[in-house]
Image (cartoon, rainbow, N blue to C red):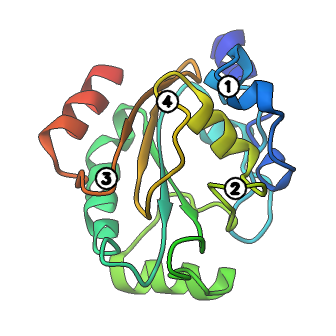
Amino acid sequence: MSLNAMSMFSLVFALAAAPAPSPAAKSGSPMSSSISSLSLRGLSGQALPADALAGKVVLFVNVASKCGYTPQYKGLQALYEANKDAGLVIVGVPCNQFGAQEPGTPEQIEGFCQLNYGVNFPLLEKQDVNGAGRSALYGALVGSAAGGGADVKWNFEKFLVGRDGSVLARFPSSVAPDSPELKAAIKAAL
């Protein structure tokens, strides 16, 4: 693994629960266009291992268990299974900001995802994707050039991040995991 790949996600794992980034970081500064300086915690609060994302193409998706888009979990799992050996990681980010559609505890969220959709890709701890409490992860995703600075509109928005940690593309909730445009962007990144 190259030094760049190692450093890219060396910290991608505790700022998810940290305060929102400064306005400069949200405005598209170099820091906000890369997730290389972030730390992430899994659903149960444990640090995500540094090698979980290092050198991988990552699709971050803010997820919810009680949403009209919740069945996308099935497509996300299929997309993950079909591409994980090529270097794709899907990361679900539970969020309760849209219609309170993710009220569960970490155990409830994990159980729901595994029982109903067989999800085995990483899930992060619940976090805000908008507002004053926006996580550092979503500050970087939204604040990137591809993120465009606009708030996340609903559950199941998708951000594609390249192997170098740069945000490559953003897709609205209506873009399904099996859509040609998402598959093409992932294929190009892999």
Q: Quadrant of the N terminus?
A: top right
Query: Which numbered disc flags the more N-terminal residue, 4 or 3?
Result: 3
Query: Which numbered disc flags the more N-terminal residue, 2 or 4?
Result: 2
Query: Which numbered disc flags the more N-terminal residue, 3 or 1?
Result: 1
Q: Nearer the viewer, mark 3 or mark 1?
A: 1
Q: Position of residue 133 (x, y in %)?
A: 78, 57
- The residue tagged 4 is 148
Which one is in front, 171 or 148? Answer: 148
Q: Is residue 74 left or right of residue 5?
A: left
- The residue tagged 2 is 131
Hey, which quadrant is residue 78 in on the image? bottom left
Disc 2 crowd, CA 10 A, few/some/many (<14, 14-19, 20+): few
Q: Nearer the viewer, mark 4 or mark 3?
A: 4
Indicate which disc residue 165 carries. Answer: none
Give yes or no for contact between labels 2 and 4 (Cβ–Cβ under 8 Å): no
Whether residue 37 is visible: no
- Residue that sits furthest to the top in the current view: 3
The residue depicted at 41 percent of the width and 53 percent of the height is 157
Q: Amino acid at mark 2?
A: Gly
Q: Position of residue 4 (x, y in %)?
A: 68, 11
Cα distance, mark 4 to mark 3? 29 Å
Cα distance, mark 3 to mark 1? 35 Å
Q: Position of residue 88 (x, y in %)?
A: 41, 38
The residue depicted at 57 percent of the width and 26 percent of the height is 144
Give yes or no for contact between labels 2 and 3 (Cβ–Cβ under 8 Å): no
The residue depicted at 47 percent of the width and 85 percent of the height is 112
Q: Is residue 103 left or right of residue 178?
A: right
Q: Amino acid at mark 1?
A: Ser
- The residue tagged 1 is 27
Give yes or no for contact between labels 4 and 1 (Cβ–Cβ under 8 Å): no
Disc 3 crowd, CA 10 A, few/some/many (<14, 14-19, 20+): some
- The residue tagged 3 is 81
